[in-house]
Amino acid sequence: NKPPRCQLLLLWILPADLEESWWVPLTLLMVLPHSFVAEPAEGDPGGSALLQRVKRGWVWNQFFVLEEYTGLEPQYIGKLHSDMDKGDGSIRYILTGEGAGTTFTIDDSTGDIHAIQRLDREVKSLYVLRAQARNRLTDMPLEPESELFVKIQDINDNEPKFLDGPYQATVPEMSKVGTPVIQLTATDADDPTYGNSARVVYSILEGQPYFSVDAKTGMVRVSLADMDRETRENYTVVIQAKDMGGQLGGLAGTTTINITLSDVNDNAPVFEKSKHVLESAPMGSVVGRIWAKDRDVGVNADMKYRIIDGDGRDTFDISTDPTNRFGIIMVKKLLDFEKKPSYTLKVEGVNTHPDLTFQNPGPFKDVTIVHVSVEDVDEPPLFDSAAYYTELPEDAEIGTVMGTVTARDPDAANNTVRYSIEKTSDPDKFFYIELTSGSLMTMRSLDREEISWHNITVLAMEMNNPSQISSVSVAVKVLDVNDNPPSLTHYLETYVCENAKAGQLVETVTAVDPDEPPAGQHFHYSLAPEAANNPNFTLRDNQDNTAWILTRRSSWSQKDQTVFYLPILISDDEQPVQTSTSTLTVRVCSCDHEGNAMSCNAEAYSLPTSLSRGALIAILACIFVLLVMILLMLSLRSHWKKPYLCDEEENIHENIVRYDDEGGGEEDTEAFDIAAMWNPREVHHRGKTRQDMLPEIESLSRYVPQACVVGGGRGDGNVHGYVLAKLLEADGDPCAPPYDSLQTYAYEGDGSIAESLSSLQSGNSNADHEYDYLNDWGPRFKKLAEMYGVVETSSPPVW
């Protein structure tokens, strides 16, 4: 029943990753219960007896770890170890608690603890873990569970921040040096109990010498005396907060303070007696305000202002503002610096609520003199007229001057003015204006009937200042000239009934004239001279710009004449007189009893009563079908006559002559008479032809005169002599037609065992052709083999 005795071992350990100037006390605890130390032997008060039994205990070597570790390997935290661990792997270490398995891991064999995630002290500064050692085979605990604390050690990774910035502050004007303006506080998320990471120092970056800041407290104060609001009202101050005590390497944050000087009553009232206004100010614009200050307050200080005298009394006006304190001077008439550069106004201010009890001190009003100066403004040129109007006859010649516009510079400089016509107002360029004089003249011929009015815009521009431009409108009226002849209006064609009587009205004609004379239109009508003695119609002028067309006879008939042409001469009453001739077409028509035209054709075609309309349509349909069949037959016939050519034959660019008859070789004696080759002179008498067909090409010998051939015996010599004689005859006759022709064929047949028989390639070789292979082609080529093959003979050739 003795109380337990423990021994506490305290070690000072310096981690390698800490700064040299900081020592961190790390405790390595070995909790030793009384059973860990042997009981002293009886009679041994010093307790020097030998140890009897030892209680196993935990050993760890580190509790602190730095935040924001950036290494590639997991960060080492510490090590768990039991004195029962012999290093044979029989003990399994287990770690539980905050972040175990996610933030911290443990090697269950060695007991090494690592952090696998980056730690942030500002997020969590302390982790509580529990450690336990168990038998790997039996999973029985070997030691009691112990509690482990891991504290995250701070580094300077957060700059100071002003959480409420930017700031607004107000301080009275004329404040003394040191007057507090605003208290600033910067917050640093780093650990204030460790190092200088959270020790903030304040400084001013902008706003000197008007304001300053206390380096420790952050209090902003006035550093310049007698700052006047009327001179400057607003100031911008930039304050910096830096940690690490302001040392090099510390992190810093800034904020802005907008400081406004509030007004204090540091100025005596002054009646402003001078005002300025631009000469271009429009009527009703405000020139300025005046104030007669009354030391009373409320309604007792209400004022009413009026102009009682001065040379500007008719040019300016004054009214009282809604607060009844100020008088507002406004422009009443347009100003002109060149005419009057300044004005004087005598203004009176009167209390609107006087107290009759206090009449003795004097009247409740005051009078002041206000001088108004007019400031010169560069004004655009000014035309001498607000608008221009001119008239011009439509027959005016090109280049006729129709008027002049004038503008001047109203300023004292009196700059030179240049004139031009705005393009959009005269797109067709009918007019031109002289650049310096402003004279307007025509550039094209005018026609009142097309455009009777021209509205153009003339621009005036200062030569020294092109931005100063003014414009004026010029209206041009084109006056009428009698240059168009009258002509008939709508009725250029009419009709007369076959049953019309003499003197009957056929048509009433009227005329139009695009001209517009001042006295109005007046036309004269008559028949043209060539129709003055017209036996069919007459014309009566009604003297009211109309005329009647009347018949002169009766008994009209379509069979005699269907159309009459009546030329009408029309003239106007203006100078020069314009005349024109219009032709009225009159048709003879069959009319009903009311005079309405029924038919104006010479004779209407009528179908026979025995043939209906349907029958006529059927006949026409049959004729159409017959025509189609004929066209189809002609088309088919043309296709039958066209020979069929395959693609290969159509690609041959040669003239090929086709023969419908085919020779039968040596056994065929029907196509020609072989005797003609032996005796050509008898060809016309003993010729024997084929009975089944006539040859398309007759023998050449029938048309060529026969010559005597040396040697009249039968045999090869006769043939040779005949050919030689013909050759000599052709060579000696310059007029003989070229019956012989040379045909060149570039297309060779395929599949022949003789291959190509063409001589086109023979020119490439100087060697003689060998025809001995003809002996191998059979009896059909025997004759060719004898003619071209090698034959041993001692006699020389004939040619």
Image (cartoon, grey):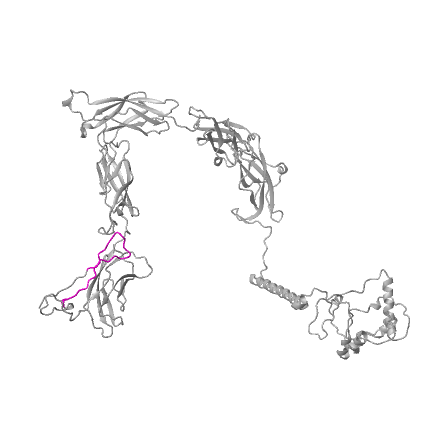
Q: Which residues are magenta?
A: 10-34
Please give the name of the residue rendered at 67% of the width and 65% of the height, measured from the top-left corner.
Answer: 651
Taking 493 as reference, is 65 above or below it?
below
726 and 507: which is toward the camera: 726
Taking 676 as reference, is 171 above or below it?
above
| Residue 308: % across, % down | 27, 21
Whether 32 is among the magenta residues is: yes
| Residue 717: % across, % down | 88, 73
332 and 79: which is toward the camera: 79
Q: Quadrant of the C terminus?
A: bottom right
Taking 609 as reference, is 259 above or below it?
above
Task: Name the quadrant containing residue 52.
Answer: bottom left
Taking 191 as reference, is 239 above or below it?
above
546 and 608: which is toward the camera: 546
Please give the name of the residue rendered at 30% of the width and 26% of the height, measured from the top-left corner.
Answer: 317
Magenta stretch: helix, strand or loop mostly: loop
367 and 713: which is toward the camera: 367
Does any portion of residue 161 appear in the rendered image? Answer: no
Whether 243 is among the magenta residues is: no
| Residue 203: % across, % down | 27, 41
Please give the name of the residue rendered at 38% of the width and 26% of the height, measured from the top-left corner.
Answer: 376
| Residue 19: % across, % down | 27, 53
Task: Name the quadrant containing residue 570.
Answer: top right
